[in-house]
């Protein structure tokens, strides 16, 4: 059975970094298991964190489906082939990027086919880690909407916590079957401020971790190095390892 971990947060909270480091943990600690990373954020930066290439996205395929179908080939067959070719195969994990939102015109038929194809691809993996945008649009549009773990990421600010709370409300309104929902507060300097801790307690979901601010991560980002190359003893690496260990025991 596929274990799906969805990570959501507003821009700038570090959700893509945490997604990438969760993927790294699964690769290192779940040998023999197949891992798929899905970049469902239109900015499509997860491949940079993972140190992988990105040639084509589902958004590109959706656009090409209007004109690129080979004569004599059904649209379903063309989409099935195109999506499978868009999966970037890495040495240790695979990557699929959703890309830009829909353009003008109706994509209803293509979207329905794409959802079914992607669900079939997901089922071939032991773990799927999905980096979502704040609106969690791609989660809500999947045919299979089962999520084992939903991580809502905030920075250590009341504005960030308010955004996480809004995402919590949204997740309950969407037709998503979420088994466990957690809060993660990222980039905490020193002790978590009392106001942030009080807000976390008031949200009514477990605070899974307070991830410390890590200067090494900033150095890697500034140098353009893949964040999965961070040392195992880096503060953020240790924190994400703790998160993953908790998730895998649920």
Image (cartoon, helix red, strand yellow):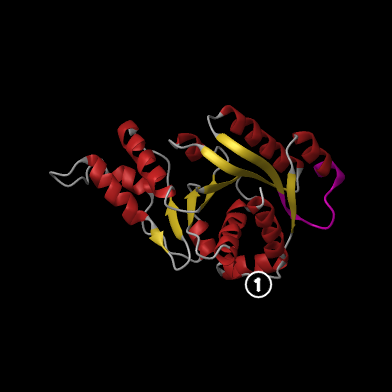
| Image position, residue 171 (x, y; %) | 60, 33
**For this view, does 183 lie left or right of residue 20?**
right
| Image position, residue 99 (x, y; %) | 43, 48
* Foreground pick, 207 / 60: 207
**For this view, does 227 lie left or right of residue 86?**
right
**Where, by quadrant of the figure, is residue 109 drawn?**
top left
Which residue lies most toward the left here?
72
Which residue lies most toward the right here?
194
Secondary structure under badge 1? loop
Image position of 169 with respect to 86: above or below:
above
Residue 236 visible in the shown view: yes
* Foreground pick, 206 / 59: 206
Residue 43 visible in the shown view: no
Q: How many marks?
A: 1
Residue 158 among those drawn in magenta: no
| Image position, residue 76 (x, y; %) | 26, 41
Q: Which residues are magenta?
A: 185-196
Image position of 221 with respect to 189: above or below:
below
Kindly identify the residue that appears in the image at 58 percent across and 41 percent down: 134
**Where, by quadrant of the figure, is residue 114 drawn?**
top left
Kindly identify the residue that appears in the image at 22 percent across and 43 percent down: 67
Kindly identify the residue that appears in the image at 82 percent across and 43 percent down: 197
Residue 187 among those drawn in magenta: yes
Instruction: Write down the residue under mark 1.
Output: 231
Q: Residues within 10 Å of mark 1 (few under 14, many from 20)?
A: few
């Amino acid at each position: 059975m596929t274990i799906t971990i969805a990570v959501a947060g507003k821009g700038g909270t570090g959700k893509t970094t945490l997604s990438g480091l969760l993927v790294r943990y699964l690769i290192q600690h779940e040998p023999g298991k197949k891992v798929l990373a899905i970049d469902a954020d239109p900015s499509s930066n997860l491949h940079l964190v993972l140190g992988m290439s990105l040639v084509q996205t589902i958004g590109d395929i959706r656009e090409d489906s209007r004109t690129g179908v080979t004569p004599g080939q059904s649209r379903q067959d063309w989409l099935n082939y195109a999506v499978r070719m868009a999966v970037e195969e890495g040495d240790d994990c695979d990557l699929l990027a959703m890309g830009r939102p829909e353009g003008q015109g109706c994509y209803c038929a293509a979207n329905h086919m794409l959802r079914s194809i992607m669900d079939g691809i997901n089922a071939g993996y032991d773990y799927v880690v999905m980096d979502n945008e704040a609106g969690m649009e791609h989660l809500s549009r999947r045919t299979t909407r089962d999520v084992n773990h939903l991580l809502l990421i905030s920075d250590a600010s009341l504005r960030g916590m308010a955004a996480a709370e809004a995402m919590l409300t949204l997740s309950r309104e969407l037709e998503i079957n979420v088994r466990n929902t957690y809060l993660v507060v990222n980039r905490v300097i020193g002790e978590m401020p009392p106001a942030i801790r009080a807000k976390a307690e008031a949200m009514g979901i477990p605070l899974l971790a307070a991830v410390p601010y890590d200067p090494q991560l900033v150095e890697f980002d500034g140098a353009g190095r893949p964040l999965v190359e961070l040392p195992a003893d880096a503060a953020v690496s240790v924190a994400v390892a703790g998160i993953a260990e908790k998730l895998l025991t649920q």
